[in-house]
Image: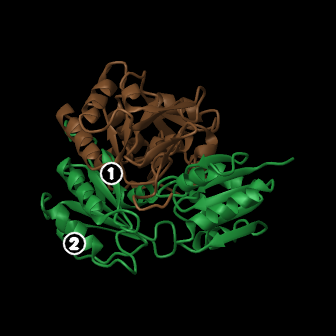
Chain colours: A green, B brown
Amino acid sequence: MNNKKIWVVGIGPGSEKDMTLRAHEVLTECDYICGYTVYCDLVRPLFPDKEYISTPMTGEEKRVELAFEKADEGNEVAMICSGDAGVYGMAGLVYEIGRDYPEVEIEVIPGVTAALSGAALLGAPLIHDFCLISLSDRLTPIELIEKRLRAAASADMVIVIYNPESRGRSGYLAKACDILLETLPPDRICGIARNIGRDGENKIVMKLDELRNAQADMFCTVFVGNSSTKNINEVMVTERGYKSER
Amino acid sequence: MNNKKIWVVGIGPGSEKDMTLRAHEVLTECDYICGYTVYCDLVRPLFPDKEYISTPMTGEEKRVELAFEKADEGNEVAMICSGDAGVYGMAGLVYEIGRDYPEVEIEVIPGVTAALSGAALLGAPLIHDFCLISLSDRLTPIELIEKRLRAAASADMVIVIYNPESRGRSGYLAKACDILLETLPPDRICGIARNIGRDGENKIVMKLDELRNAQADMFCTVFVGNSSTKNINEVMVTERGYKSER
C-alpha cells in the first residue's frame, strides 16, 4: 500500500491527555512525525519508535517541503503543531506548498489552542464573542496589529493575545495595553495563563493597568475581558450576554 | 471518600475521537453526566452506565443548579458542552452559580470548539488573527452584534460566525453579510461547515455575495476570510501574514 498523506495535527497545549483521541491515533499509526524541534521533543517520549523530522522555529517552509518529500515517497507523515493545527498553525502552509504535490492527500486534525486551554485555566473568560490577536510583527505590519486591538476594544470583545513578547520583541504587551487603555478602563479584568499543560503552569487574574506592567514571554497567553467580565475569587468569568438576570 | 466536584467538559464537535483523552477519562470516572438533552443523547452510547441529568436548551440555569445539588451531596458531576466548555459554553454559569456552593470544586476541561473543527474541515482559514461572533440576540443587543461585525471587517480579521440562523431567527446571516459588504468586496472568500463530526458533515467554499444568499441553520458554522484568504482547489486558506513570499 502506498499512502501519500500528510496529517496536520494539533497536539494541544502539551500533555498527552490534552490531545484528542484522533490526534493520538494518527501519531500512533503514521510513519513519520515532523515538527518544530521543541514539539518533537515533547511527543518523542510518547511515540518513541517513530522517525522524526524536526527543524528550528523559523524553518517552517523547509519543514513542510521535507514532509512532502517523505509523503510523496509513499509515507504517512504527521506534521505536529502546538495547540491547534490551524490557529497560527502549519495547516495553511501545508495546503499552499501542497499545490506542488498533487498526489499527496492532506487532512487537518484540530486540537485545543491556547485560547481554550488558557481560558479553562483562568476560569471562563471566553463565554462571549472574542478575538485572537498575535502581537508578533514578523509577518504582519505593526500598524495593522494596533488597528485590530483598537477595533476589538471599541466593540467590547474579549481579546486573547498570542505571542505577547519574545526575546526579540520586548515592550510589546505594554504598548498593546496602552492602546487598549485609550478606550478601556484601567480596572478591566484581565488574566495571564503561563506554561499551559506543562511544568510551571500557572495563572493570574489582574486588572488592565496591572497587565500593562506585568512580565510576559512567549509561554504566556493573555486575556483581556469585556465590560461584563468579573473576577470571582481569582477566577476570570465573562457573562453570557448583556440581558442576564444574574 | 466525598468528592464534591463539577467538571465542565468540552466534548468537541460530536464523535468520540474528537474528545481529548482527558475529557474521555473524566466522563469514564464521574458519577453523573449532566447536559442539554441532545448532547446527553450523543454520549450515552459511549458511557451507557452513567446516570444522566438532562434539561432542554433554554434550561441552563436549572441544569447547573441540578448539577450542583448532586455534587454537593458528594458526587463528581460532569457538565458536558458541545465543542469547548468555555466558548459560548457552560463554564461561566457554573462559576457564577458556584458562589452559592463554596464546598464544590470546579474544573474546566477544554475541547475543540466549532471554529477549530470547522476550520479543519474547510482547510486553513484561521491561520491569522480572527474573531468569533455569535448572531444570537437572545442575550445580546443586535446593535452590539452589528458593531462587532463592522469592527472585525474594518480591521481585516477573519470572522467566524456562530449561530448564524435558527428556527426563530431567519434572515440573520443575510443581514450580517449585508453589513460586511459595506466594507468587504463581494468576492471575499467564505465557507460554511455543516454538521461537523456528525452524520451529514459537509463543507462548501464560496464568495461573500454567495454566502449572502446561502442556506444556513443552527448546525452551521460560517467563516469569512480576510484579504489574504484564498480558495485553493475548494480549500479555504488564509496566509500566515502579509509579508510572505508565496
Residue B46: x and y, percent? Answer: 64, 37
Q: Report in which chain the residue with disc 2 lies.
A: A
Residue found at the very far right of the displayed protein: A1
Q: Is residue B3 above or below residue B70?
A: below
Question: Does A101 sit left or right of A179 as displayed?
Answer: right
Residue B232: x and y, percent? Answer: 55, 42
Please state which of residues A225 and B189 is positioned toward the viewer in this rendering. Answer: B189
Residue linked to disc 2: A212
Residue found at the very far front of the displayed protein: B245
> Which quadrant of the structure image shows residue B242?
bottom left
For the point 17% across and 70% down, the residue is A209
* Whether residue A120 is visible: yes
Helix, strand or loop for disc 2: loop
Please state which of residues B53 and B179 is positioned toward the viewer in this rendering. Answer: B179
Question: Does A8 sit left or right of B36 as displayed?
Answer: right
Residue type indicated by callout 1: Cys
Residue A142: x and y, percent? Answer: 29, 65
**CA gap, disc 2 to disc 1?**
19 Å
Residue linked to disc 1: A131
Helix, strand or loop for disc 1: strand
Circle 2 packing at 10 Å, graded few (<14), some (14-19), many (20+), is some
Question: Does A84 sit left or right of A239 as displayed?
Answer: right
Circle 1 packing at 10 Å, graded few (<14), some (14-19), many (20+), is many
Q: Report in which chain the residue with disc 1 lies.
A: A
Q: Are marks 2 and 1 on the same chain?
A: yes
Residue type indicated by callout 2: Arg
Please state which of residues B215 and B201 is positioned toward the viewer in this rendering. Answer: B215
Q: Is residue A180 above or below residue A22?
A: below
